[in-house]
Amino acid sequence: MSIALQGDWGTGKTSFINSMQAILDSTKEHKTIYFNIWQYSRFNMSDDLYTSFVLSINSAIECLSNNDKKKVENVKSVLKGICSSL
């Protein structure tokens, strides 16, 4: 699942995301990955966006590798398929 928030500067978007991330991560049933897409639009790095997004997911998965190797390998396989289809 992905969540996108829109709102004016200073309306609490980041605070909301941080609160939701803390709640979800505390359940141990979910793993959240925070990816700041804003930096790519601000610095005109849109060409690197997709690669950086996939690498962020891969890094988060590496942190889980001790917990459930089969799930990690399944997700990595999907990521490799996505990357090779581009």
Image (tube, grey):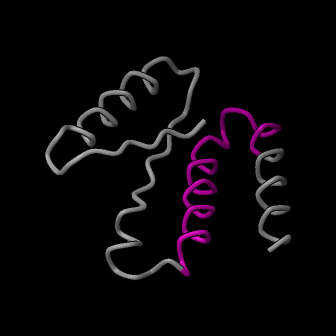
Magenta stretch secondary structure, dominant: helix
**Nearest the eye: 26 or 8:** 8
Q: Is residue 46 above or below residue 38?
A: below
Q: Is 48 a magenta residue?
A: yes
Residue 58 point in image, percent of width and height: 63, 56
Magenta residues span 47-72
> Is 6 situated left or right of 85 in this image?
left
Q: Quadrant of the C terminus?
A: bottom right
Point 76% across, 57% down: residue: 79
Question: Most extreme residue toward the top, as rendered?
Answer: 27
Q: Is residue 74 above or below residue 77?
A: above
**Nearest the eye: 26 or 65:** 26
Point 14% across, 46% down: residue: 10
> Is 40 situated left or right of 54 in this image?
left
Point 60% across, 64% down: residue: 55
Question: Most extreme residue toward the left, as rendered?
Answer: 10
**Nearest the eye: 5 or 82:** 5
Q: Is residue 33 above or below residue 20?
A: below
Q: Is residue 6 above or below residue 18?
A: below
> Residue 5 occupies which quadrant of the picture?
top left
Q: Is 52 a magenta residue?
A: yes
> Residue 48 occupies which quadrant of the picture?
bottom right
**Nearest the eye: 84 or 62:** 84
